[in-house]
Image (tube, rainbow, N blue to C red):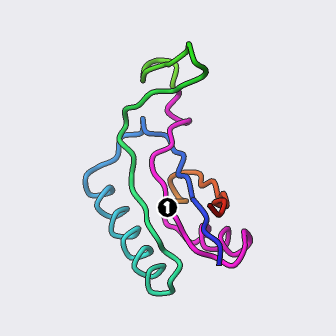
């Protein structure tokens, strides 16, 4: 099996209620439990909303007006799958897909 990273890209500017956030987390936790039970889930974490954007040796941007909310990578998940098609199929079952885009990328073997 290969390992794949799923990058969650969403709009962090939308306000949601605490109840909606709790429901999203419950749905996500149930999905993670299912992925763990099948042996597909390896790891995942949300990312802090701060950071730096390094363009080259002389250009480092900090969070600010340059960053469009729709461009924010909010977290990642690492899954095991037989191939990219299976990883994509698994990503399509993630409940977070209702609220963000998901990039599926294979990890290189070290």
State the image coordinates of residue 74 (x, y, percent, origin top left): 45, 46
Residue drawn at x 50%, y 83% is 39
Q: Which residue is mark 1?
A: 77
Q: Residue at x 61, y 20 (%)?
A: 56
Label 1 packing within 10 angstroms: few (<14), some (14-19), many (20+): some
At 51% from the left and 44% from the top, the residue drawn is 10
Q: Quadrant of the C terminus?
A: bottom right
Q: Secondary structure at mark 1?
A: strand
Horizontal arrangement in the rendering, residue 81 relative to residue 94 (left or right): right
- In the rendered structure, does residue 74 fall within the stretch colored magenta? yes
Asked whether residue 104 is drawn in magenta, I would say: no
Q: How many marks?
A: 1
Q: Position of residue 86 (x, y in %)?
A: 69, 75
Instruction: Decide: is 21 above or below 9.
Output: below
The residue drawn where x is 50% and y is 53% is: 99
Which segment is the magenta one? Answer: 68-95
Residue 5's place in the image compared with 101, above or below, is: below
């Amino acid at each position: 099996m290969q390992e794949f990273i799923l990058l969650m890209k969403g709009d962090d500017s939308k306000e949601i209620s605490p109840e909606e956030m709790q429901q999203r987390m419950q749905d996500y936790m149930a999905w993670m439990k299912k992925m763990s039970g099948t042996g597909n889930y390896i790891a995942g974490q949300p990312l802090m909303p701060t950071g730096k954007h390094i363009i080259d040796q002389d250009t480092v941007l900090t969070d600010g007006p340059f960053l469009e909310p729709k461009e924010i990578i909010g977290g990642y998940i690492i899954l095991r799958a037989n191939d990219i098609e299976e990883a994509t199929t698994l990503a399509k079952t993630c409940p977070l897909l209702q609220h963000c885009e998901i990039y599926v990328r294979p990890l290189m073997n070290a």
